[in-house]
Image (cartoon, rainbow, N blue to C red):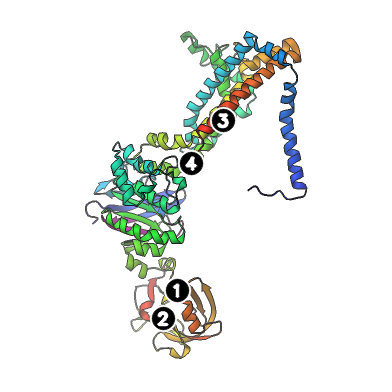
Amino acid sequence: MALSWGRGPFPVVTWTLAGLLLAFILVPLLRLGVATTPAALAAEAAQPDVLASIALTLKDAVISALLAVVFGVPLAYVLARRIVRGRAILQAAVDLPLAVPHTVAGIALLFVFGRNGWLGAPLEPFGIAFYGTEWGIVAAMLFVSVPFAVNSVRDAIESLDPQLDHAARSLGATPWHAFRRVTLPLAARGIVTGAVLAYARSISEFGAVVILAYFPMTAPVKVYEEYLQNGLDRSAAAALLLLLVALSTFVVVRVAASGRFAR
Amino acid sequence: MSGEGGLEIRGLHAHAGAFRLRDVDVTVPPGRVLIVLGPSGAGKTVMLETIAGFRRPMAGTISLAARPIAGRPPEERRIGVVFQHYALFPHLTVEENVRFGPRAAGRDDPLAARATLERVGIAHLAGRKPGTLSGGERQRVAVARALAIGPQLLLLDEPLSALDAPTRDELRSGLRDLLHGLGIPAVYVTHDQSEASLIGDDVAVLMDGRIRQIGPAAEVLDRPVELPVARFLGLRSLGAVRVEDGCAVVGPPERTLRAPAGVEGPAVACYRPSEVELASAAAARAENSFEAIVDAVHAQGDVTRVEIGGPLPITAVTLPRVARDLGLAAGARVAVTLPPSAIRIVRSA
C-alpha cells in the first residue's frame, strides 16, 4: 500500500516541481505533434530519402546497441566484480562520453577513424572506411551509447550476490560456466535494458555522427538539413516522423524485453 | 593424523582486506564434524572461503584425502559448501539447482538428483523456484545441492542462522544426523554454543583470526583455557587467583572461594551463572558458600538473572520458579554456593 502523503506544503511543492519538469519534457514534443498536419506527415513519409534516412538510423542504432552490449558486458563484469585495480579510472573512462560534447567526440573520432586517422588510414586499403560511411555512423553512435550499456549491465551484475558465483564454482563450474549459467541469465534484464538505452541513445545521436559521417544521412542529420534548407515548418513533419518511429520502436523493444526477462 | 579422506590444514595464513587469519592448524578426520565457533568478525567465514578456494592463502597447506589442494581452483576441489544465506540460483528450480554441479562436471543423472532430494526430504519441492520456499526448505535445498557433487568435504557457514528459532530447533537434529552419516569430514561455522554442542564432535574457538582452543566439543565448551575464550563462552570472571596450599583462591578474605589449581602463570577464576546455586539464607554451607544480599533480579524469558552484590559480585541464572520460591528480590538475603568443580581456572591472557 502506498504511504500517505499527509498534508502541508511538502506534497504541494513536490508535485509542482515534478509537474514542471514533466511539462518541460512533454510540451515541446506535444507542440511538435500539432505543428504539422497528417497530410504533410504522409507526404514526408512518402519521400524516399526521408524513409531511407530513418531505415539507416534504425539499422545502425541496432548494430551499435549490439556492439555496445557484446563489448560492454565483459567490461561491466570487470567493473562490477572489482577484479581489477584502478576500477575508478576505468569507470571514469566509461562515463567520459557522457561529459564530452558530442561535436568534440566527433572530432576526436575523426582523428582515429578519419581518412588520415590512426585506424582509418591503415584500414582504408582493406576497404574498411569510416569517414562518410555507415561504419562511421556506427562508430559515432557506439561512442556515445557505451556508458548507457555498460552502466546498466554493471548495475545488474553488482546487484547479484557474489556468493552465487562462489556457489557455482564450488559445484564444479569453471569461471566461464558460472558466468554463462548464473551471472548472464540473472543479469539478462539489465543487459536488455542496456541494449535498449544504447539503441535509444544511438537513434538520437547527431553531433558526433554529423562530423564523422554527414553522408549517408541519418534521420537526425536529415531533419537538421530540412530545417536549414526549408525552415521550421517543413522540418517539423520530418522531425515528427522520426520521433514517432523512434518512440514506437523504443516502446516495442522495451515492452518485449520487460515481458521476456521479467524475473 | 587425519586418516584417509580427512582434511588437514597446517600453518594457514589468509587475509581479507586488513583482516588477517593466522596460523590455523586443523585436522578433521572423515565422519567427524569440526565446529568453528567464534564471535562476529573472528575470521570464521574467511577460513571457510580459504578452504573452499574462494580466497588464496598467503601461507600454509590444505590437504584433502592426503592431496594438497591449496593451489587448486574451487571447481577442482570437490568441496560442498552450504552458504549462510544459501546462495541458491533464483532462476533455476530446486531440481535444477541440485543438478547444477553434476551438469557442470558432465555427470548429470536425474535419478541421482532425485535420490539426493529424497535424502534431505525435499523431493516434493523439485519443481519449485527458491523464491517460493520457506527458510527451512531453502536450507535443505542448499544441503542437497552441496551433496549432489559427491563432496570430499562439506563446509557449512552458519547454515541455521538465517532461520527463526522454532525452525532452527527443528532442523538441528536432522542436520546433525545427516552430517554424521556422510562419512566425510565437515567444517561447520557458527557462533551458537548450543548448536556447537549438539552438532559438533570437535570445536575450534576462533577469535581475532586465531584458533584459541581446539579439542573435543564437550571439553572445549566446558573447560576453556584462557579468559577471552571463557568470556565468549558465557563464563564470568571472579578475578585473579592466588595459590594457597595448592588451591586456587579468589576473592577477599571475608568471601573466599576455592578451586583446584589449574594452570601455571597468571590465572583468573571463572564460572557459569547457570552453575551458581542459590538457597535460602539459612542453608549456607561451609565450602564456597556465603550469605549475600541480592542487588537486582531480572526476568529473561525462560530464566531469571540474579545479581548478587557485596565484596565478590556474582551473577546467577536460575529458573523463575526457584526465584519465586526463594522470594528473590532486591535486598533479599540468599545463600550462594559456587562448588569448586564449577569454578574454572583459566589463563588471564
Residue occupying image coordinates x 65% and y 47%: A2
Q: Horizontally, is B228 left or right of B309 in the view?
A: left
Which range is magenta? B24-42
Q: Nearer the viewer, residue B317 or A189?
A: A189
Tell me the SS state at disc 4: loop
Lower position in the chain sequence, tag 3 or tag 4:
4
Residue occupying image coordinates x 49% and y 12%: A128
Tell me the SS state at disc 1: strand
Is A48 rendered above or below residue B317? above
Q: Position of residue A9 (x, y in %)?
A: 77, 47
Subunit ID for the residue under disc 1 = B
Q: Which residue is mark 3?
A: A255
For the residues labelled 1 and 4, the Cα–Cα distance comes to 45 Å
| Label pair 3/4, CB-CB below 8 angstroms | no
Q: Which residue is mark 4?
A: A160
Q: Residue furthest bottom?
A: B282
Is B310 rendered above or below residue B231? below
Is B255 rendered above or below residue B67? below
